[in-house]
Amino acid sequence: MNRRQALASGCAGVGICLGGLLVHSNPTGESDAVPVVAGEELELTPGEKTTATFRVDDAGSVRVSSLPESESVVFDVNDASFSDSPVGQDDADPPYWNWSPPELSVEISVPVRVPDRTTSGEYRYAVTAWHADVERGPDRTRDDANAETESFHITVTDD
């Protein structure tokens, strides 16, 4: 290998290393990871109960809610179960579940029930995740600009 090839190879290697550092860090020292949310579509009849299971990768904080908030589909968030238990919970309605450091991948199961008098139709629920325990405003809410939200359908059919 001549000197020109060695120098070109060395510069390319340094460029790749520096490029990797720039992509994986930022000036604040916080991670640039974005949570990934995967869930399931559900189909229920009035009076039926099931469990909604979803997975969140890079989970620092997670919350689940119906969209819009209604009594047609009820999430029993107080009876949720986790593949890795959160280190804390912010008592809000619905609550925020928190992991520190962020959990690489967590599976969350939340009991869901459809009251007897629910009319058939499409309903939705959302899973919102934040990578880290983000700053909260004076009303203890998180900045949704830093959140990843995915919504899923719940179909309620006639008996």
Image (spheres, helix red, strand yellow):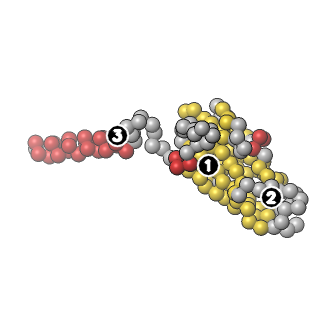
Say which residue appears at 14% left-offset and 46% top-offset. Answer: 5
Q: In the rendering, at what x and y percent does residue 19 appear?
A: 31, 44
N-terminal-most mark, 2 or 1:
2
- Quadrant in the picture for the C terminus: bottom right
Q: Is residue 72 left or right of residue 101?
A: right
Mark whose residue sits in front, 3 or 1? 1
Kind of residue indicated by mark 1: Thr
Q: In the rendering, at what x and y percent does residue 30 appear?
A: 45, 37
Q: Is residue 20 left or right of residue 118?
A: left
| C-alpha distance separating marks 2 and 3 | 48 Å
Tell me: residue 143, above or below residue 84.
Answer: below
Q: Which residue is mark 1?
A: 128
Q: Which residue is mark 2?
A: 72
Say which residue appears at 83% left-offset and 66% top-offset. Answer: 119
Q: In the rendering, at what x and y percent does residue 115 appear?
A: 86, 56
Q: In the rendering, at what x and y percent does residue 155 appear?
A: 75, 64
SS at badge 3: helix
| Residue reaching furthest to the front | 138
Say which residue appears at 73% left-offset and 40% top-offset. Answer: 81
Residues at circles 2 and 1 in contact by the CB criterion of under 8 Å: no
Disc marking residue 28:
none
Number of callouts: 3
SS at badge 2: loop
| C-alpha distance separating marks 3 and 1 | 28 Å
N-terminal-most mark, 2 or 3:
3
Disc marking residue 21:
3
Q: Residues within 10 Å of mark 1 (few under 14, many from 20)?
A: many
For residue 107, what is the image quadrant?
Answer: top right
Q: Is residue 50 left or right of residue 147?
A: right
Seen from the viewer's position, the closer of residues 81 and 128 is 128
